[in-house]
Each structure stands twice: as structure tokens, then as C-alpha cells.
Image: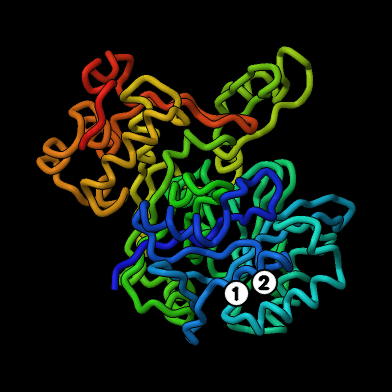
Amino acid sequence: MEFIADFHIHSKYSRATSRDMDVEHIAENAKLKGIKLMGSGDFTHHLWLEELKHTLEDLGNGLFKHKDIYFILTAEISSIYSKNNRSYRIHNLIFSPSFKTTDKINAALSRVGNLASDGRPILGLDAAELARIVFDIDENCMVIPAHAWTPWFSVFGSMSGFDRIEDCFEEQSPKIFALETGLSSDPAMNWRVSALDKYTLISNSDSHSPAKIGREANVFDCDLNYSAIRDVLKNKDKKKFLYTIEFFPEEGKYHFDGHRLCGISFSPEETKKHKGICPKCGKPVTVGVMNRVDVLADRQHGYVPSNSIPFKNLIPLDEIIADAKGVSKTSVSVEREYRSIIARFNNEFDILLRASPEELRKNLPSRIADGVLRVRQAKVNIKPGFDGEYGKIDIFGGEDKLPEAEKQLTLF
């Protein structure tokens, strides 16, 4: 069966996360988006794990269920450690096939650090050792480097990472078969690095609030059980892994280089011209994802490996509505319009991905329909994000926003 999965989120027990990130709200928003399978997030936190055990129905196949939404047990670990006289900060996703395995992982990791401190615990644990611990407990687990290019906390991070997967995971490297691209890169950027051809590229929201669930996701056509999904990812099965749903990478908050506090945003070429130094404060700029990919790339942009999984760049519906109306996406009018539009369709991804132009124009305000179609055609302008600041979207290229009549009225 075809379904959409978002494996990487955080619970209400992670710092800087909405209090609404509980099972009920996660399931509700997954249904609004059109997502069938959610990662649980944060299974290392004892209170969240108890909520998962109490709320989810164990299906006996490595997946769990709440109402109409399936869940898979996932967690993110922040490893901060020194190796070879250098400091590293690496985030990894762990997938577990059962509560039994999860309990064993938590018992082992609790001997390393305090798991109760945060939903995404920080451990002074080498990423290779983390992988060894997890795989020794259950070889059916998956360890996947999270947001692999983020400057400060990732396997390839310009400020914190390695140049090769093998240098990070050492003898555990053969057991690593997938990477998460992160919001600031898309598969096309990763395809420039030939060493990554053997890895399956996945995309997830890394959501800290219900509204951001599914801003990146994965589309499968396989059985809904843990082993089937693991096999698809391990084998990079193009027949069963249909495509990933991506941000436009420019919208990610680490796409370009720069200094947020100084208001300096540089392309890789501009960074090179300034010798990596911020012209305002005289300190090194934060080197972003595009620059880091350039450093490791051995191919020109546009190369497509023969075994690559396709992808589609999208902008979330609430952002399209907000840009059409000329208001903030947190505006009450955006939420009202969003709910009204969803009532006309099954879910958000039906609108963004599947509805015909005729259906969109029949059921949406004309400006919003135009916005959805422009996004599908990649006819958007984005001022790239940098140093922790999201990129700024302009779908309509400075044209007039939503007509006043449509700005005031929502659909009924």
C-alpha cells in the first residue's frame, strides 16, 4: 500500500518544543497532513515512553497505532565527544522494532548519561560506540545520521563533523545504510557526492510543533510493518520507495553561510571572497550546507545517480496561504482558511501533490490555487536561510496579494 511517513519528530519533553506534541495532537495533525506513519520521537525519555506504552496499540509487527495513525519507535541522540584531538557533535536517529528492544537501549544508554534531562539527550558517547551499543542489543535496529549537513550538529557539519561516514562510524559503517538530508539540503545536492550513492536518502520534518509535521516526508509503497520498511531502506528499493517530499533547500535555516546577529548572508562564492570572515564583526562566518556540499562534492550540480530515489520540493499549505494573503503564517486567518480548505479535500498532501488544476481552481480561492500550482512548478523566489534563520519565501514575485474579498472570506 502507498503511504507517507515522517520518522523524525520530538515530543513535548524536548526543549523548545510545543506542549501539544503529545500522541493525540501528533495523530490529529498527521491525519490533516495525509501522513499514515509517524516516528514516535524521544523514546529515550521515560515519561514519553510511558505515554507511548499507555496510548499506542502494539500491532506485533514492529509498528504501533493510535486511531488511524501508525507509529514507529524512534529517538534522536546528540553525541558530543572528542576523538583524535578534535571535538565532534553528531546527531543520530535510532529506530527500534519493539518496546522490549527500546527498554534495553535505554538501560544501556542510561549508564552513559542522563536520559531524563531532555527528550533528545546529550551523551558524551562516540557515534561509533552508540551504533555498536544499539546493534549489539538488536541487529534489526536502524541508526541513521540526522540532518546530515547541519553545521553544528551532524555527521558532515562544517563546524562539528567528518568528511566521510567511515571516519565517524568506523567498524559500524557497513550497518549504516541511510542518511537524513535535513531541511537545508535536498537529494540533488547530495547526489553531487559520489560516496553517498550507496545510501538511501530520507527526509523528515524534525518537527517541534504539530503544525510542522510533514514539512518533509517519505512516500512508500510497501507493507506497513517494521521489517518491510527496513528492507526498503536497506536495499534502496526504488519500486517501493517512491519519492521524498522536500523543502526547497533555500528555505532551510542553514543553506547559505553568514552571521545572523550581523545580518550577513553569503553564498559560498561570497564567503570565499571574504576569506570566511564576517565584514561586520571580524569573526568567521557560520559555513552553511551549500558551501559544505561544495567542499565534499566530486560532481557538478545536475548529476543524477542511476539508483537515486526521486523527490518533490514543496512548500507547506499554511505558508502558501499566508503568502497569498500577505499575512504571517501564525495569523488566525491562516488557520481558519487552512481548516476550511482541508474540509474540501481529504488532507493537505492531496492538495499539494494530487489534486488536478481544475479541482484546485474549483475548490480554492484563486490566489491560493495559483500558489499551489506555482510551487509544483518550482516558480518561487526564496531568500536563502543562513546561520539559524529560515529562508524567506516569495511565491508571487512581488505581485498583489489575495484580493480583498478573498482575504476576508473563507470557504464554507
Residue at position x 32%, y 63% in the image? 242
> Residue 204: which disc?
none
- Residue 72 location (% of width, % of height): 52, 71
Q: 395 above or below 312?
A: above
Mark-to-mark CA distance, 1 and 2: 6 Å
Residue type at mark 2: give it: Glu
Residue at position x 59%, y 29% in the image? 389
Residue 206 vs residue 234, the one in the foreground? 206
Q: Which residue is mark 1?
A: 54
Residues at badges 1 and 2 in contact (C-beta under 8 Å)?
yes
Q: Is residue 308 left or right of residue 392?
A: left
Residue type at mark 1: give it: His
Q: Point out the image quarter for the N terminus.
A: bottom left
Q: Tag 2: Cα neighbours inside 10 Å, few (<14), some, or many (≥20)?
A: few
Residue 354 vs residue 69, the one in the foreground? 69
> Residue 50: which disc?
2
Residue 132 vs residue 247, the one in the foreground? 247
Residue most toward the right? 85
Q: Point out the image quarter for the C terminus.
A: top left
Number of marks present in the image shown: 2
Q: 383 above or below 143?
A: above
Q: Is residue 255 visible?
A: yes
Q: 400 above or below 45?
A: above
Q: Is residue 284 left or right of residue 43?
A: right
Residue most toward the bottom? 60
What's the image's color scheme?
rainbow
- Residue 206 location (% of width, % of height): 56, 51
Residue at position x 43%, y 42% in the image? 247
Residue at position x 37%, y 19% in the image? 326
